[in-house]
Amino acid sequence: MGRSRMTLGMQLLLLQVAIVLTTVVGTGVTAMLIQERQLREGYQDRMIAVAQSVAGLPVIRGAFDDPDPSATIQPVAEVIRNASDVTYVVVANVDGIRYSHPNPDRIGERVSTDPTIPLSGEVYVGTQTGTLGESWRVKVPIFDDDGDVMGQVSVGILESELRADFLGGLGGLLGALAVAALVGVVGSAWIGRVIRRRIYGLEPDEIRAMLETREAMLHGIREGIVAVDDRGRIVLMNDAAARLLDVEAPDRVLGLPVEEVLDRDLARFIASGEDREAPVLSGERVLLVHGDRVRVEGREVGSIAILRDRTELETMLRELEGAQGLAEGLRAQSHEFSNKLHVVSGLLELGHVDAAIAFIQRVGSGGALSTLGDHDGIADVETAALVLAKRSRAGELGLAFDVDVESHLDATTDARERTDLVTVVGNLVDNAIEACVLGGRIELSIRDDLEPGTVVVRVDDDGPGVPPERRAAIFEPDVSGKAPAPGKARRGIGLTIVQRVTARAGGGVAVDASPAGGARFVVRLPWGSGATSAEAAPKRPTETDATATPAAGGRR
């Protein structure tokens, strides 16, 4: 028969007791070392003070010229020794002959230790063995009126007395350590019981078996499952949910707030814990989500959502909406296509045929590319071409289009970053052009030198602006600051594209009042991740503008 394994409770108790005892012993040893050092330093300060006071007494210095110096010095030294609680006070001349000693028989003899240091004018502190035994001593020189050394004073205390004083003060310390150890052991036992209660008295093998069974069940079913705790942090996401939500590594999102991982609408639905079923848009998928609260022993601990893919069904339903729905979709796509045409137009106008061909190949078909010199500080050829094309269009409409003289943009080798920047700049400039009237002014600033790994795009116009109460909703679909034109498709697409591109890239977008009188849009995007000049990894920017719209609906 195999031996029974030690229970988890016993393992926890022994481990914590070992930690407590190790800590207490280590603390005790450290405290004793500190106490011994403080005791020794205290005696050292006292001995130095006594020795220097004796060396400075006129009666001691004057007695050196007497026929019998010890007759005067010995009584004075003994009085000081008894008053200062030291073992001895020995006064000697430059030849090392003692004029005082606790044992009168030693007076007149040469000192038993080397007097070289004090007789050279220096102070000596250390442990030496003399006629009374091993002692902690201080030796100071005695100077005459001319400043010459005429003798020495040695003050010391036996090492045995130091140890006795040290051991005498250990009682309280050892008692405190014993109490601390007892409290630690009792506390360890209590913590072990609490932990056992929290895990329902299960042993590690039982917990592992339950976890393996749960993992096999959750990752084997086709429906996606996402669970969040009462603080809105993801605690569970199975493989099906990760596939439906385009999450590459579900293990890495555990513990993150649900708003940072999922689309805004889906995150709100799951965090609300509403007991209902509803279709929710997540990226390009339409999910049928069933949500519910999770209760354990009558206490709400979070919420759970079961996800089913209804994309195909929703696609078929959308196809039945007819020509109007198709026209609106085509108009949304025309924003992107128009920007690409402007890039090609600008490249061709600048004579960069190779660059235009390469851009066309990357975004769809055909192409060629050459290099473009700095244009208003913008070294990226595609962005510079787009800016040039937009400037020409604004001029045709009677608008002034200025590029900030401090604009700066190094080229990047990341094709996605360049495409995102072109999309953002094109849509923001188009929005500004539509907002301005004849004679209006637009200012564009593109800078990658303000924040490491980030390009900041700012577009100002002198149009009607965006009222403060509408700034939070201006990036939503079908919300626009301009009145719809008769017979035209719905507005509110361009800024929505900007917001979603920015969200997907991990950036931020904000709208505020412009000093020019209209609206100011500020976008931050990662930039330079593929360039050699980028030293820092792109980070998610923090909006500092008065009204900031977070990247809603985006996924990290």
Image (spheres, grey):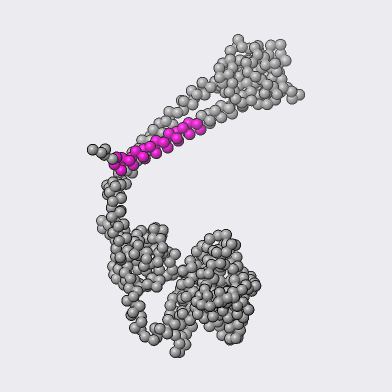
What residue sits 45% from the left and 28% below the top?
A: 170
Magenta region, mostly helix, strand or loop? helix
Using the image as rendered, state which of residue 386 and residue 400 is in the foreground: 386
Residue 307 lies in magenta, yes or no?
no
Please provide percent x and percent y for residue 297. 26, 56
What residue sits 34% from the left and 61% below the top?
A: 238
Looking at the rendered structure, the number of numbered marks drawn on it comes to: 0
**Range covered by the magenta-colored residues:** 6-35
Judged left or right of residue 207, residue 137 is right
What residue sits 51% from the left and 62% below the top?
A: 539
Quadrant position of the N terminus in the picture:
top left
Using the image as rendered, state which of residue 451 and residue 363 is in the foreground: 363
Please provide percent x and percent y for residue 115. 66, 20
Please provide percent x and percent y for residue 379. 62, 70
In the image as oriented, which residue stretches furthest toward the right? 146
Please provide percent x and percent y for residue 519. 54, 77
Residue 32 lies in magenta, yes or no?
yes
What residue sits 60% from the left and 21% below the top?
A: 155
Residue 428 visible in rendering: no
Q: Give the vertical position of 400 relative to 256 (above or below).
A: below
Residue 171 visible in rendering: yes
